[in-house]
Amino acid sequence: MSTPALRSAAPLPKPNLAEMLAFEAQDKNDLDPKPISFHRFFEHNSRKDNIMMTIGTISAIIAGLFLPSISLIMGSIANNFGDGDIDPSEMSELVAQTSKLVILVSVVIFVFGYIFFAFWQHLAENISLNLRKLYLRALLNQEVAYFEKIKIE
């Protein structure tokens, strides 16, 4: 049993298909990201940020160049153990020399890897902070009517 108010309600108007498609197209155009140039990523960087980015990148390249040397060193160790004609004193000297080389390469990789990570992490924090400041400044410069249009659910 239905109430009289529900029975007498006027039927809902049928949506206009052209209006719906236009509305959907407008929403899609608003949501589609617009491509930007590569240099636009770095336009808010300070001189200090650019220097840190350069040092971090060079450090990453250096650390990356030393990584394959560990494999070469380990290959030489395998070759040294494969030779059966080396006496024990020469073998211990070779192992000590190779150990020093592994330690040296490992320290170089660690130091330059740390510099790379620390500088790029600091750079990311600086960029994030600058973008937040710009966003807040843009929000505070808006007219009050802009905030009245926003529907918060």
Image (cartoon, rainbow, N blue to C red):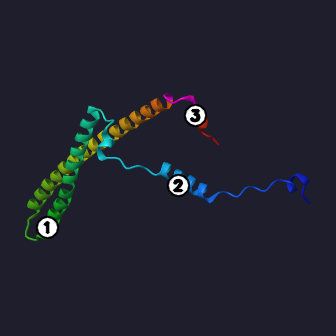
Number of numbered callouts drawn: 3
Q: Nearer the viewer, mark 1 or mark 3?
A: 3
Judge left or right: residue 96 versus residue 13.
left
Q: CA distance from mark 2 to mark 3?
A: 24 Å
Q: CA distance from mark 1 to mark 3?
A: 73 Å
Which residue is identified by label 2? 25
Q: Residue at x 17, y 57 (%)?
A: 69
Q: Earlier in the sequence, mark 2 or mark 3?
A: 2
Q: In the drawing, what numbered circle is on residue 79?
A: 1
The amino acid beneath tag 1 is Asn
Instruction: Return the mark for residue 12.
Output: none
Q: Which residue is drawn at the image coordinates 22% and 46% (left, top)?
A: 107
Magenta highlight range: 140-146
Q: Residue at x 11, y 71 (%)?
A: 84
Label 3 secondary element: helix
Q: Which mark is residue 147?
A: 3
Query: Label 2 crowding class (10 Å Cα cut-off): few <14, some 14-19, many 20+?
Result: few
Q: Position of residue 144 (x, y in %)?
A: 57, 29
Please tell me which residue lies in front, 43 or 101: 43
Q: Point out residue 9 in the picture as x, y percentages from the top left corner.
A: 83, 53
Q: Is residue 133 above or below residue 34?
A: above
Is there CB contact under 8 Å for labels 1 and 3?
no
Q: Secondary structure at mark 2?
A: helix
Please check the rendered image and state whether residue 5 is part of the magenta-colored stretch, yes or no: no
Q: Which label lies toward us, 2 or 1?
A: 2
Locate residue 85, reporting x and y percent.
7, 70
Callout 1: few (<14), some (14-19), or many (20+) C-alpha neighbours within 10 Å? few
Q: Amino acid at mark 3?
A: Phe
